Amino acid sequence: MQTSVLLSIKPEFAEKIFQGIKKYEFRKAVFKNRNIQKVIVYASAPVSKVIGEFEIEDILEHETELLWTKTKRYSGIPKDYFDSYFRGREVGYAIKIRKSKLYKAPLDLSRHFNVKYPPQSFMYI
């Protein structure tokens, strides 16, 4: 059985992922199980639904300035947002997106995944 993670992502960033503009999802911490191959995307409020999924190509772990240098072209975010997000952190993570799939209809978290509350960051499913 393939284990996946459910990630909470702001709607504007989730939209960019499914448009192919954002090819990296930045995180301050990532899941310990590096065998995860799929991410289920929960678009946070005001959408509050599971809207799609993507395959993981790689997870980059670097000092934040190097991380920005390697990912800026397909970051989908401005540098000042990146700097603000990682402020006070020496190391950051970028989940490289291989292939994304937007669902035809958004899914309800509790009904389709038996999860009552969305994760602050991520949860295994």
Image: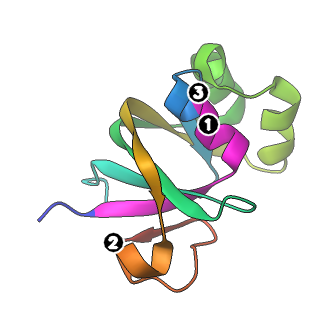
Figure check: 88 above or below 26: below
Mark 1 and mark 2 lie on one chain; the one further toward the N terminus is: 1
Mark earlier in primary sequence (2, 3): 3
Horizontal side of 30 relative to 13 (left or right) equals: left
Quadrant showing the N terminus: bottom left
What color scheme is it? rainbow
Q: Is residue 6 magenta?
A: yes
- Of the two numbered discs 1 and 2 in the rendering, the one whose residue sits closer to the viewer: 1
Q: Which mark is residue 15?
A: 1
Residue at 67% in and 58% down: 47
Sequence-wise, the earlier of marks 3 and 1 is: 1
Q: Quadrant of residue 99?
A: top left
Residue located beneath label 2 in the image: 125
| Residue drawn at (61%, 36%) of the image | 15
Viewer-nearest residue: 48 or 99 = 48
Q: Which kind of residue does numbered mark 3 sit on?
A: Lys
Range of the magenta residues?
4-16
Identify the residue at the far left of this view.
1
Q: Give the image location of residue 116, x and y in percent.
A: 52, 86
C-beta proximity under 8 Å, tags 1 and 2 = no
Residue 32 seen in the current view:
no
Q: Secondary structure at mark 2?
A: loop
Neighbour tally class for label 1: few under 14, some 14-19, many 20 plus, Cα within 10 Å:
some
Whole-angstrom CA distance, mark 2 to mark 3, is: 24 Å
- Type of the residue with mark 2: Ile
Residue 18 can be seen in this image: yes
Query: Label 3: which residue?
Result: 22
